């Protein structure tokens, strides 16, 4: 499958397709309007990245006509014209504000008696309570985000390309005694490369992390901040993370690597992790059930004696974020479909030894899958020389 990475903005056809898919889902649920407060869903439907403080930003999608974006008057100059598609803007004066000028007063003006209004499951209570009647809770936009368009695939592939290039630089700089803090500069390099390719890229929709866990911490997969003076050491396992989103589209690549030598106690769990990963790639195909993929991968790891060393699911998706539904997780019993994108990242974590995890950003195709990220895979390639 040929995929050409792209850093271009979505065109009107792409944005109109998203709106129509959302409306189709609304009609099935009997909604006349759908209210989005989630910045991620607003970004998906408008291509506008926002940073919410106390002033609400609310997108209302009616069953007909233009979406209406309720925003503070403070932002009336810099937001309109930034996004994609045909959007109407409605402004409120300030927050807080006198009765009649409040954001909630402006929001109520968009509805009529008898309207059937839907909201996201993550909609804040104060927004839901400001709506007339009892809203229908349904993740309309989150659900349509699960299957990617050709445009989205190209944009995720572009982010995958950026993180893969940064990861190669990370491995090239790895040396005993080097501070883990130095790897953070690679995230700045990703942003610089993105802005070189597209000077209009939105930094509000960009957040990258470039991190390494030395063996002292790599058994604890989310412990990146316990010691700012962490250093690379001889041996391993070290675990890398280059992840996030660039201009509104996410990807990640991660590897376990060693410097100078591979401790004997690390060889078998490394091989088991690689085997579990290969199984996940084999299973992550159209028609498979996501929960079953995770159960089979976990069963493989348990059969090797590492059942007590599992602490997370096989994978998650990417899109306008770097971490979203759908999930390769036990209990998430949904069918895998073409043009879904997942991380494949089964891991094994051994206190006193370290962590073992690869992660790639993987597109499901009509017949299988293809990785959108690239990094070394063999133990030989990931045993780096001391320099």
Image (cartoon, rainbow, N blue to C red):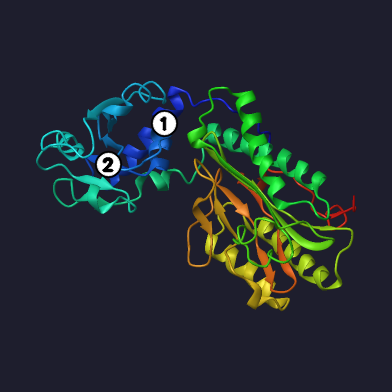
Crowding at mark 1 (Cα within 10 Å: few <14, some 14-19, many 20+): many
Find the distance from the CA under tag 1 to the CA under tag 2.
Answer: 18 Å
Dividing the picture into quarters, in which one does residue 47 lie?
A: top left
Circles 1 and 2: CB atoms closer than 8 Å: no
Residue nearest the viewer, comparing 305 with 182: 182
Which residue bears the numbered disc 2?
34
Quarter holding the N terminus is: top right
Relative to 146, 76 lies left or right: left
* Image position of 87 (left or right of 207): left
**Residue drawn at point x = 38 percent, y = 20 percent:** 81
Can residue 366 be seen here? The reply is no
Please provide percent x and percent y for residue 12.
43, 23
Q: Residue at x 52, y 50 (%)?
A: 323
| Above or below 172: residue 63 | above
Q: Secondary structure at mark 2?
A: strand
Residue 178 point in image, percent of width and height:
78, 51
Q: Nearer the viewer, mark 1 or mark 2?
A: 1
Q: Earlier in the sequence, mark 1 or mark 2?
A: 2
Estimate how packed mark 2 is, as few (under 14), some (14 to 19) or many (20 or more) residues with alpha carbons within 10 Å.
Answer: many
Q: Is residue 71 above or below residue 233?
A: above
Q: Is residue 253 left or right of residue 294?
A: right
Determine the secondary structure under disc 1: loop
Residue located at (39% from left, 34% from top): 45
- Tell me residue 315's x, y (percent): 58, 57
At 75% from the left edge and 59% from the top edge, which residue is drawn? 238
- Give the left or right position of residue 245, taking residue 379 as reference: left
Q: Which residue is mark 1?
A: 48
Front-lying residue, 63 or 322 = 322
Name the disc covering residue 221, or none. none
Residue at the front extreme of this rendering: 229
Is residue 15 in sight in this rendering? yes
* Residue 275: % across, % down: 75, 64
């Amino acid at each position: 499958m040929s995929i050409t990475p792209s850093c271009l903005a979505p065109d009107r056809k792409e944005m109109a397709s998203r709106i129509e898919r959302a409306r189709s889902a609304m009609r099935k649920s009997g909604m006349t309007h759908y209210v989005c407060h989630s910045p991620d869903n607003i970004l998906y439907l408008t291509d506008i990245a926002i940073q919410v403080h106390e002033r609400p930003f609310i997108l209302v999608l009616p069953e007909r006509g233009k979406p209406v974006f309720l925003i503070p008057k403070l932002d009336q100059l810099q937001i309109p014209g930034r996004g994609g598609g045909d959007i109407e803007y409605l402004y409120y004066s300030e927050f807080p504000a006198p009765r009649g000028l409040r954001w909630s007063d402006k929001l109520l003006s968009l509805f009529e008696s008898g309207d059937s209004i839907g909201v996201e499951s993550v909609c804040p209570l104060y927004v839901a309570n400001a709506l007339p009647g009892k809203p229908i809770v349904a993740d309309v936009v989150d659900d349509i985000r699960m299957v990617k368009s050709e445009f989205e695939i190209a944009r995720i592939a572009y982010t995958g390309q950026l993180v893969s290039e940064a990861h190669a630089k990370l491995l090239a700089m790895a040396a005993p005694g080097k501070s883990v803090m130095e790897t953070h500069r690679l995230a700045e390099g990703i942003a610089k490369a993105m802005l070189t390719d597209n000077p209009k890229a939105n930094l509000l929709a960009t957040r990258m992390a470039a991190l390494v866990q030395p063996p002292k911490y790599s058994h604890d997969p989310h412990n990146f901040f316990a010691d700012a003076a962490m250093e690379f050491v001889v041996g391993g396992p070290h675990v890398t993370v280059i992840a996030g989103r660039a201009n509104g589209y996410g990807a990640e690549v991660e590897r376990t690597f060693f410097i100078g030598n591979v401790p004997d106690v690390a060889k078998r769990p490394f091989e088991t992790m690689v085997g579990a990963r290969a199984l996940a790639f084999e299973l992550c195909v159209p028609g498979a059930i996501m929960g079953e993929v995770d159960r089979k991968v976990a069963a493989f790891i348990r059969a090797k004696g590492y059942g007590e060393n599992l602490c997370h699911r096989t994978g998650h998706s990417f899109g306008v974020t770097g971490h979203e539904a759908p999930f390769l997780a036990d209990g998430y019993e949904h069918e895998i479909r073409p043009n879904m994108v997942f991380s494949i990242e089964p891991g094994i974590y051994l206190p006193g030894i370290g962590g073992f995890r690869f992660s790639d950003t993987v597109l499901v195709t009509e017949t299988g899958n293809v990785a959108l990220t690239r990094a070394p895979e063999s133990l030989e390639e990931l045993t780096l020389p001391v320099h």
